[in-house]
Image (spheres, rainbow, N blue to C red):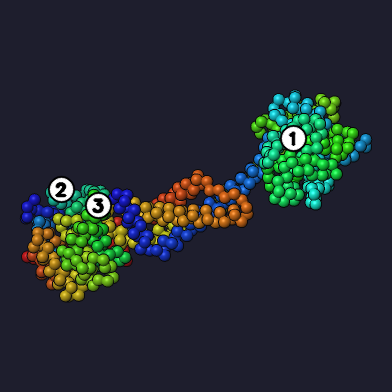
Amino acid sequence: MTAGEELIVLEDVTKTYRLGEVDVRPLRGVSVSIRRGELVAIQGASGSGKTTLLNLVGCLDRPSSGRYTLLGRDVSGLDKDELARVRHETFGFVFQNFCLLGRASALENVELPLLYGDAPPRRQRLARAAEMLERVGLGDRMTHNPGQLSGGQQQRVAIARALVTHPSVLLADEPTGNLDTRAGADILELFLKLNAEGLTIIVVTHDPAVAAKTRRVILVSDGLILGAAA
Amino acid sequence: MNAGVALALASRSLQRHRVRTGLAMLGIVIGIAAVICMVALGQGAGDIMQAQLNAMGRNLLMIWPGAASSSGGISFGGGTNASLTPGDAEALLREVPSLVAVSPVERTRGQQVIHGAHNWTPQSIQGVGETFPHVRDWPVEEGEFFTARDVTGSAKVCLIGGTVAENLFADASPLGETIRIKNIPFRVNGVLTRKGTSSMGSDQDDIVVLPYTSCLNLLEGSSFDDIDQILAAVETPEQIPQAIADITEVLRARHRLAPDEVSDFRILAMAEMASQGLEMQKTMSALLAGIASISLLVGGIGIMNIMLVSVTERTREIGLRLAVGARGRDILQQFLVEAVLLTGLAGLIGMALGAGISSVLADAMGWPFKLSPQVMSLSAAFSCAVGVFFGLYPALRAARLDPIEALRYE
């Protein structure tokens, strides 16, 4: 595997589901390709389908039609368990609301993904979790609960958790949405740093200012890709 | 996810919600404790009855004279007919193959027994045969029982029960001492083992036994040789029905009864009466355990309730776990292990509590305290089964969650 190879290829992907009597089509035919090492923003207004797109890319959901090739493998037709495995091995997720376990320490939160798949022994899990917390600059906050951490710190814990499985791609859904400008800027700095180290990152945002920090912007509107601003 | 990780996860989650965990466990704790108590107490009661049954003699048959009746057909009541003789007893032993020992019994009541400055009126003074310890399954604690020669010779010997020994001799040994009944001196050959209170409530140790011949000839001075009762022992309780039939046949023949005449004696098998009581007691304790297990069911429903609340409350957490690569079955396992850990732990506490309560109760009632390992392991298994059964539905609900919807759940 080399930098620049095509990691994610979506071909005419749609998503349709029924909501009561109505068919909702958050994605109406999207084709996009993302290469290893890219830092991409998916930008769009709320309801544009950008989160649905991210869920499809992250294998949290399956496309209704079209083809999704991940690392050269067609993953459009995988079942739930296979998708779970792909998520575990390939992706790290960062959410707008952090999604940390409130009663667990930062270390335990970061350890969480390592419990699944082929779980290494506890000692190794904790060592890897500690290493990741160091990497996001929280080496001195390992035993703190999320309640004892600031928003920015909580999001760093979430990022450490996303990275602990050494994923190929980091998927972030409005990672700065719940943070003040300063903490948001820090998180974006961290993303830039991680990207510089070779990590592929996809950020979903409605905020053009956030998108402007990335190297490639995919504009989504009404379930379609409008264009790519570089 | 391997089992160790699942267990660690579950115990961590239970530790994080101590109060809820405690409350959820309470129902199972009470349920298991109640079942253990009921079974343990039921077994204690059963053992007491069994012991009483054994004290009476499981293999014992009692033969009483029948009711005498006047020519006008008025019954004078059981035992009024002087129809049994020591000869009947000998004939029974000779002719009924299932009988292993036979002893005539002649009772005297209201006699004062005197030793030195002490006197005592025992509840019963019985003249019996030398086979009495065997027939009644009532060994001698100290000394020797009297012999066949003592019986033939109407010897002035006797044995006394624990209560009599206590009242006449206090702490001194009664062996070889002389007691006087109706001013006739009897040498105390031994003391009978204590039997305690009978199921009817009388003190069985308040007794003096002597050769029935001595009782007939010396105490009663009777020229008749009719006796009050014949005790007969079979080898095993199963032989009792056959023995009753055989005894009836032999006695009817000896008493020259015509086929249409009613028997002038009655045969009573203590074992049969007692085993009926035992059956009833078993039914009762099964019923009580059944009622107790209803509280276990209620406790199980409580567990299901708590687990459902927990699943709903942790929907986002489940979504997160699914997002980072947990499969449905990992989530299922996590919640199931949590439920089983909860009920298993509650079961252990309930077992300890139940054992404690029933030992205190047994102590208070003077029953033997017994905890059968079967009941313990059964209730441990049962409480885990309750966890699986009532934890399955909430766990399935958790496992079937869609990651996207779960993550979005507020």
Question: Can you name the residue that lies furthest to the bottom here?
Answer: A181
Q: Quadrant of residue A15?
A: bottom left
Look at discs 1 and 3 and give the one toward the viewer: 1
Q: What separation in Å lies between label 2 and label 1 (alpha carbons)?
A: 101 Å
Mark 2 sits on what residue?
A: A73
Mark 1 sits on what residue?
A: B146
Is B86 or B47 nearer to us in this picture?
B86
Tags 3 and 2 touching, CB below 8 Å: no
Is B357 or B2 nearer to us in this picture?
B357
- Counting labels gives 3
| Subunit ID for the residue under disc 1 | B
**What label does residue A121 carry, if any?**
3
Q: Secondary structure at mark 1?
A: loop
Q: Point out the image quarter for the C terminus of chain B.
A: bottom left
Residue found at x 72% / y 40%: B190
Q: Amino acid at mark 2?
A: Arg
Q: Secondary structure at mark 2?
A: strand
Residue found at x 78% / y 26%: B91
Q: What separation in Å lies between label 1 and label 3 (alpha carbons)?
A: 79 Å
Same chain letter for marks 1 and 3: no
Residue found at x 46% / y 53%: B347
Q: Amino acid at mark 1?
A: Phe
Neighbor class of circle 1 (other Cα within 10 Å; few <14, some 14-19, many 20+) is many
Above or below: residue B30 compared with residue B152: below
| Subunit ID for the residue under disc 3 | A
| Residue B274 visible at all | no
Give the mark nearer the N terminus: 3 vs 2.
2
Q: Amino acid at mark 3?
A: Pro
Q: Quadrant of residue B24?
A: bottom left
Tags 1 and 3 touching, CB below 8 Å: no
Residue B255, how many percent across, how many down? 84, 27
